[in-house]
Image (cartoon, helix red, strand yellow):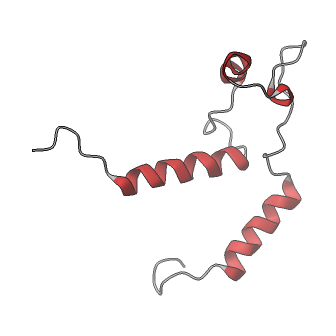
Amino acid sequence: MLRHSLDVMQIEKNNFDNIINLILDMLGKTKDNLKSRLNLPDIYECPELYVIDNGKGLIPIFILNAKEKKELFDWIIHSVKFPNGLCI
């Protein structure tokens, strides 16, 4: 008997979703918000992610701009191979 059953595929999907939502800066889906930025100095030394004096955070380097998003989507469309019938 297992007390806890972890579904590895669900964990991988959640991690993938969180990373994609973060780099694409999807409103309401990302975990990068003001509350998490306020806790950051206590956890991790990364001054470029801290909240500045006016109460806003700087845009992190891992957020893609419009050109980079287009390049990512073009790469997915033209270079990634999917099994037949998986994606249309």
46 vs 88, left or right, is right
Outermost residue toward the bottom? 84
| Quadrant hosting residue 82 | bottom right
Viewer-side residue, 85 vs 57 = 57
Where is residue 60? Give x, y as percent: 82, 38
The correct choice, above or below, for 44 with respect to 21 in the image is above
Q: Quadrant of the C terminus?
A: bottom right
**Does 13 sit left or right of 54 as displayed?**
left
Residue 36 pos. (x, y %): 66, 23
Residue 37 in the image: above or below residue 32: above
Residue at 76% across / 73% down in the picture? 74
Residue 26 horizontal/vertical position (percent): 68, 44
Q: Residue 58 in the image: x percent, y percent? A: 86, 30
28 lies above or below 66: above
In the rendered structure, the answer to whether residue 12 lies left or right of residue 81 reads: left
Residue for point 71% across, 81% down:
78
- Residue 39 lies, with reference to residue 60, above or below; the image says above
Q: Would residue 74 be found to the left or right of residue 36 on screen?
A: right
